[in-house]
Image (cartoon, rainbow, N blue to C red):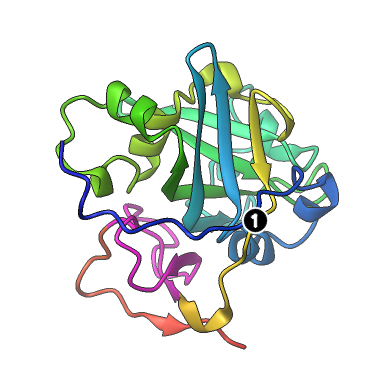
Amino acid sequence: MTSNAAPKARRSRLGSPLPTSFYARDTEHVARDLLGMVLECRTRDGVAAGRIVETEAYIGEHDLACHAAAGRTSRTEPLYGPPGMAYVYFIYGMYWCFNAVTREAGQPSAVLVRAIEPVAGVELMRARRRKVRRDVDLTNGPGKLCLALAIDGRHNRLPLQRPPIVIREAEPFSDAEIEVTPRIGISKSADWPLRWIVRGNPFVSKTPAHFPKRPHPR
C-alpha cells in the first residue's frame, strides 16, 4: 500500500473527551465544531483514531433526510437523546455509519461523521482494509471510516466520553479552512447546506461537481 499521498496529521496534544454539554447545542454548531476533533475507537487489537474533516447535520423530524422523519422507533430511539451518545446504523446491507447525537433529549438530531484523517493506529486501519491501496482512501467516507476504526452496531447508544468510543478535544480548524455544501447521497431535503468540510483536505469524500460551495461564515 502506498502512503505518500497522505499528508502528515496536525500535531497537537489530544485533550479530554468532549463533555456532554458540547453536544447539547444546535446540531449545525456541533457539526462545524467537530471538525478537528479526534474520533477514537479502542478494540482488543489496539486504538485507531482520526481527526474529523467532514460532517453532516441531521436536524429533526422536519428534516426528511433525517431518520427521525419516520418518528420514534426502535431504530431511531438513540436520536432522541441524551446528547453525547453514539448513533450507529447499518446501510445497504454492507456499511456502518457513525453519528454523534446532539441537542437536548427529546429533540432528535445527530451529526454524521463522514471522513477522518488518521492520526493513530494507521497499521490497524490498513490491516482492516487490506484491499485499499492508498492511505487517503482508508477513511474518506462514512462506511470506510467505520471499517477502519472497527465501529459497528455494538457501539450504538454508547456514551462518547469514555472507551471504547470517544471523541477527544484537539486542535480545531479555523473558519477560513472550512466550506459548507449540501449533504451527499440523499434525495429529500437535498439542497440544505448542512455538510461541513475542511477545504483541500484529501481525506474529505468527493464532492459532486455540481454542488455549490460557500465559505463558512466568520
Please tell me how crowded label 1 is: few (under 14), some (14-19), or many (20+) other residues with Cα within 10 Å.
many
Q: Which residue is mark 1?
A: 170
**Magenta stretch holds residue 97:** no
Q: In the rendering, at what x and y percent does residue 189 appear?
A: 45, 62
Q: Is residue 82 left or right of residue 201?
A: right
Residue 217 is drawn in which quadrant? bottom right
Residue 99 is drawn in which quadrant? top right
Q: Looking at the rendering, in which quadrant would you find the N terminus?
A: top left
* Nearer to me, 34 or 11: 11
Q: How many marks can you see?
A: 1
Q: In the rendering, at what x and y percent does residue 152 appear?
A: 48, 22
Q: Residue at x 36, y 36 (%)?
A: 143
Magenta span main SS: loop
**Magenta stretch holds residue 203:** yes
Q: Residue at x 41, y 61 (%)?
A: 183
Q: In the rendering, at what x and y percent does residue 135 appear?
A: 25, 44
Q: In the rendering, at what x and y percent does residue 45 appear?
A: 47, 14
**Highlighted magenta segment, given as a residue range:** 179-205
Q: Amino acid at mark 1?
A: Ala
Q: Residue at x 44, y 32 (%)?
A: 121
Above or below residue 73? Residue 14 is below
Q: Looking at the rendering, in which quadrant would you find the C terminus?
A: bottom right
Is residue 72 visible to us here?
A: no
Above or below residue 81? Residue 19 is below
Q: Secondary structure at mark 1?
A: loop
Above or below residue 96? Residue 202 is below
Q: Is residue 81 left or right of residue 43?
A: right
Is residue 123 visible to us here?
A: yes
* Nearer to me, 113 or 212: 113
